[in-house]
Image: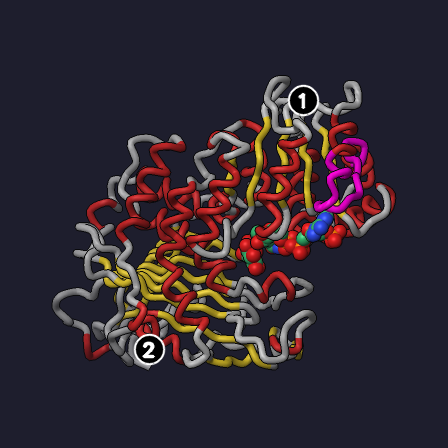
Amino acid sequence: MTEACTFVIFGATGDLARNKLLPALYHLHAAGRLNRDTRILASGRRHQDREAWLAETRSDLASSVRGGLSEEVFSRFADRTDYIRGDLNDAQFYELLHQKLSEKQAYPTDIAFYMALSPADYAGVIEKLDQVGLLEETKGWRRVVIEKPFGKDLQSAGQLQSQLARHLHEEQIFRIDHYLGKETVRNILVFRFGNALMEPLWNRNTIDHIQIIHAEPQGIGKRGATYENSGALRDMVQSHLLQLLTFVAMESPISMAADALHAEKLKVLKSIRPIPADRVNECAVRGQYAAGTVQGQSVVDYRCEQNVAADSRTETFAALKLHIDNWRWAGVPFLLRTGKRMAEKQALVAICFKKPPQQFFRASHVHCEASNWLLIGIQPHECMRLEMTVKAPGEALDTRQTSLDASFRRADETVNDAYEDLLLDIINGDRSLFLSYEEVQQAWRIVDPVLQAWEKPENDLHLYPAGSWGPAAADALFEEPCRFWRNTLEPCGCGMGKS
Ligand SMILES: NC(=O)C1=CN([C@@H]2O[C@H](COP(=O)(O)OP(=O)(O)OC[C@H]3O[C@@H](n4cnc5c(N)ncnc54)[C@H](OP(=O)(O)O)[C@@H]3O)[C@@H](O)[C@H]2O)C=CC1
Ligand SMILES: O=C1O[C@H](COP(=O)(O)O)[C@@H](O)[C@H](O)[C@H]1O
């Protein structure tokens, strides 16, 4: 049970709120994790009143919540909620909001403001909240949740940070990256730092390269206008994939407290070698989906999606090769890849170990010697799976791949969605899984040269058919012939024994 507080959601009619935040709050409510006095004040433009907003919310939840919607649970959830309609640019809206939040005993005085908005709106909303006194902490705490991306490049992130710092102190700012709330992602920390076995292997001596992959069959839905200003590099790589990289690559922190984690993650980001402007094409590949078939459904070109320019050069696919210049990782490429309208949903970290120094069993392999892989499946399948070479039964010394699975969930255990755990952290004031500004700044430093190069029309944009694994050009990021993208958790083709 958490302490009573008020959640004000700006953008409660948008994609994030409807698909992630409200389901997470519903689940927390259903599980008895929200204090009975906790209240949710949703705000948006599209719906006239609470009834209209609630009807849509009910229908959204009915199609998304685990185990199906319970009318009884929903009715009590609805009792916690209210809706306020208004335009973010209208000063009067904030007066109304202030009045509502001051209604006697209606709202707990500890308030979290959630910015489920386009990044361009954050600073203006915070300034106006301050103008009407809603950020004063005299009667209770005020926390502001900022969604990614924090700015659109290094310079705008700096401006946003200065604007926020005028109204908030750092402990009030929760820069959220929902990937850090995912169960397997947090398990990376336990797997690495809770097992003495892994540490001696976790470095350049045994690891050949590391892949961090996110693929999704979905397109951009109704987010065309937002996505056109973003693209895959800003939408996924600058935030989620680089954060995953920090968990995989960081040194052991002195504790799991926020400051200690931030410090180690920051060291990794600072150690990433800058990509020189004239070498972007060697280290980065961008793509855009063309019409195709995804999971049996025909889909249109990205350029034919709603609110997308007919000549758009926005990337829906990005792949990047990075190097970390430190003692542990020198010479180990980190390959990051994300795409929309890909063949399957797949988020995973694939760690490829070096091959044994002597190839005793070469004759038994079809394509090339097998490597050991550690597959960290984030979604849809959560796993920690080590692929090993073993002897195939029979007279000859033939080999095959098998896997050791370190399952971390019993069949009867359910797992919270990332947003559920992160919302609890916000209520509890725990910032360890939220980002420091310095981390955001470093992440922009890494992607900025690529963003700038991609603004130039002469730099390649590779079209890929929807339903594929992206443009073939991304294969060229591997320097050696026997390296390949791990698209799925299926055992890899190499080293499966004689065919
Ligand atoms: N969608 C996702 O899966 C994820 C999104 N994010 C981040 O969350 C943020 C929001 O994204 P998303 O929900 O997809 O965006 P949407 O475009 O779907 O939603 C934007 C919201 O802002 C509201 N809004 C816009 N302008 C105004 C205005 N002038 N006055 C009042 N309300 C306004 C809209 O209200 P209305 O519709 O009523 O006009 C809508 O509720 C982004 O920063 C995104 O990067 C992060 C993780 C995942
Ligand atoms: O932040 C974002 O993440 C989603 C993917 O999140 P997941 O938890 O479903 O993997 C992505 O679709 C969206 O474009 C991006 O803004």
Q: Position of residue 102 (x, y in %)?
A: 75, 23
Q: Nearer the viewer, mark 1 or mark 2?
A: 1
**Are dots 1 and 2 in contact, CB under 8 Å?**
no
The answer to whether residue 381 is left or right of residue 330 is right
Residue numbers of the magenta segment = 78-94
User: Observer-nearest residue: 47 or 451?
Assistant: 451
Q: Position of residue 207 (x, y in %)?
A: 23, 58
User: Observer-nearest residue: 246 or 164?
Assistant: 164
Quarter of the image for residue 335 reads bottom left
Q: Position of residue 304 (x, y in %)?
A: 66, 78
Circle 2: element type? helix
Q: Is residue 92 magenta?
A: yes
- The amino acid type, in three-letter code, at marker 2 is Ala
- Identity of the residue drawn at 39% across and 48% down: 441
Disc 1 designates what residue? 109
**Do we see residue 269 in this rendering?**
yes
Q: Quick one: label 2, few (<14), some, or many (20+) residues within 10 Å?
A: some
Q: Quick one: label 1, few (<14), some, or many (20+) residues within 10 Å?
A: some
Disc 2 designates what residue? 476
* Relative to 267, residue 260 above or below: above
- The amino acid type, in three-letter code, at marker 1 is Thr
* Relative to 228, residue 8 above or below: above
The answer to whether residue 133 is left or right of residue 160 is right
* Relative to 69, residue 476 above or below: below
The answer to whether residue 421 is left or right of residue 212 is right
Quarter of the image for residue 325 reads bottom left
**Do we see residue 409 in this rendering?**
no
User: Observer-nearest residue: 363 or 440?
Assistant: 440
- Identity of the residue drawn at 32% across and 50% down: 269
